[in-house]
Amino acid sequence: MRLEDCSLSEISCEALSAALKNNPSNLKELVLSRNYKLQDTGFLYLCDFLKSPDCRLQTLRFWRCSLSEISCEALGAALKFNPSNLRELNLCRNNLQDSGFLHLCDFLKSPDCRLQILRLKRCSLSKISCEALGSALKSNPSNLTELNLSENNLQDSGFLHLCGFLESKDCRLQALWLMSCSLSEISCKALATALKNNPSNLTELDLSVNNNLQDSGVLHLCGFLESPDCRLQTLRLINCNLSKISCDALVTALNLNPSHLTELDLRNNNLQSSDVQQLHDLVKSPNSKLKTLRSVEGWSQSSCFQMFGPKVSLRAKMQSFL
């Protein structure tokens, strides 16, 4: 069931909850994203349906619904009653805060929790939430495959708590988004160490924007990239204060292990045209699977077409200088 952009009110939610409680076992997906009028009062009615033992809901998306810690507390309580069916939870762009998220952690650490996708972008979370999440996932690490914590003020001190989960041999995470989380070289070093201990599952990593990684941070990541067990396919490092040093290290690492990365995004860094030439050489490598390069802005269309060979799609060529 998808009811996006419907401006549902408290009354509508009460009626919907009553209808679902009368016939709870068939619904697998509930999407009420961008319902600004929903708020906590409407969401509380839906939690009565979620705690029903007959509820078989697998996907729950309440993106941008003006929810707060009140909704998180009710959701956490409901999921503790019935934790084993939910596979995807998306609460992005709600003002949950740390006090709200902590209520969800008992559900996450439950041995019956089977959640695979957790998206909490821009939820006003801090290192407090990161510490609680890291603890919960270490208790129950094997199901989560996607984690989005972008645009939260996690800082290095928060992210370090997640690394114990990432290096666990039971961790199966495939996609990790940490855009604009106030991270630095310290987080990069810890992340690289964790991924070197458990390199084979992660396929997508985004550390872009407002993460001051610098060259020293990316150098730590290259040890992971050159591991023969690394299976990373997408790496985004937009606006991370990188220079030629990072580009040289990335090219070296990818020459040692060229067979998996298909997308590399280095836009809005201090790269020059000579650095793009190194990427061009990497694209021409017969073992390289790189299809999409986004790097130096300002190239003309003809220069870009000359720089990148037929192995790269037209769209990828255009994106490389847009």
Image (tube, rainbow, N blue to C red):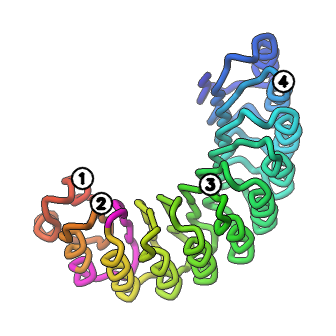
Extent of the magenta region? 259-277
Q: Quadrant of the C terminus?
A: bottom left
Can residue 8 be seen by looking at this rendering? yes
Pointer 2 with pointer 1, Cβ within 8 A: yes
Pointer 3 with pointer 4, Cβ within 8 A: no
**Which amino acid type corresponds to the residue marked 4 in the rendered image?**
Pro
Side of 236 where 217 appears, left or right: right
Of badges 4 and 2, the one in the foreground is 4
Pointer 3 with pointer 1, Cβ within 8 A: no
Of badges 2 and 1, the one in the foreground is 2
Q: How far from the left and from the top, in percent, is residue 119? A: 64, 49
Of badges 4 and 1, the one in the foreground is 4
**Which amino acid type corresponds to the residue marked 1 in the rendered image?**
Arg
Residue found 59% across the figure and 73% down from its top: 197
Residue designated by label 3: 147
**Which amino acid type corresponds to the residue marked 2 in the rendered image?**
Thr
Residue designated by label 4: 53
Secondary structure type for disc 1: helix
Residue found 82% across the figure and 45% down from its top: 107
Secondary structure type for disc 2: strand
Mark 2 surroundings within 10 Å by alpha-carbon count, few (fewer than 14), some (14 through 19), many (20 or more): many
Residue designated by label 1: 315
Side of 217 where 251 appears, left or right: left
Of badges 3 and 4, the one in the foreground is 4
Q: Name the one closer to the observer, 18 or 42.
A: 18
Residue 292's mark? Answer: 2
Residue found 35% across the figure and 86% down from its top: 244
Secondary structure type for disc 4: loop
Q: Earlier in the sequence, mark 4 or mark 1?
A: 4
Can residue 322 be seen by looking at this rendering? no
Q: Earlier in the sequence, mark 3 or mark 2?
A: 3
